[in-house]
Amino acid sequence: MDEKKNNQHILVIINEAVMFFVETFVAITLGYFIGRALDQWLFEDRTILMYVFLVIGVFAGLSNLIRRVMKRINGGK
């Protein structure tokens, strides 16, 4: 019984890690394309907004991870 519970715990950790990487990758990718499009539209030769939106994507992924971990620690609240 303990081995089954331990295996479920490991699967939950793996699931959280995979979800973190997928969500962060999607947020960074969206940030890249949105920033790149805005840079091409607003500026001719600068890539300022692309970097801004990349950083926002990284923080969005980290924010989702922190919220999910805090929810799990607080018992689903």
Image (cartoon, rainbow, N blue to C red):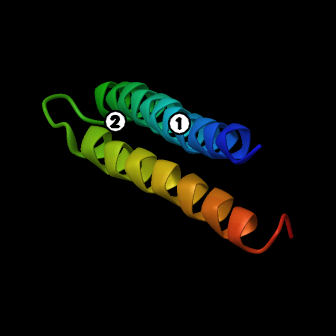
Residue that carries the numbered disc 2 in the rendered image:
42
Q: Mark 1 or 2 closer to N-term?
A: 1
Are there few (<14), some (14-19), or many (20+) residues within 10 Å of tag 1?
A: few
Three-letter code, disc 2: Leu
Give the distance between the C-alpha atoms of the residues marked 1 and 2, in whole angstroms.
Answer: 42 Å
Q: Secondary structure at mark 1?
A: helix
Q: Residue at 19% across / 37% down in the picture?
A: 47
Vertical arrangement, residue 43 with respect to residue 6, above or below: above
Specify whether 8 is left or right of 53.
right
Vertical arrangement, residue 59 with respect to residue 28, above or below: below
Query: Residue 24: image x %, image y %?
Result: 46, 39
Q: Quadrant of the C terminus?
A: bottom right
State the residue in front, 18 or 7. Answer: 7
Q: Residue at 38% across / 45% down in the picture?
A: 53
Query: Residue 14: image x %, image y %?
Result: 53, 36
Q: Residue at 49% across / 48% down in the picture?
A: 61
Residue that carries the numbered disc 1 in the rendered image:
14
Vertical arrangement, residue 44 with respect to residue 73, above or below: above
Labelled pair 1, 2 in contact (Cβ < 8 Å): no
Give the foreground label among 1 and 2.
1
Query: Residue 3: image x %, image y %?
Result: 65, 41
State the residue in front, 24 or 14. Answer: 14
Vertical arrangement, residue 70 with respect to residue 22, above or below: below
Specify whether 19 is left or right of 39.
right
Figure quadrant of residue 13: top right
Figure quadrant of residue 44: top left
State the residue in front, 28 or 66. Answer: 66
Specify whether 27 is left or right of 1.
left
Q: Secondary structure at mark 2?
A: helix
Are there few (<14), some (14-19), or many (20+) residues within 10 Å of tag 2?
A: few
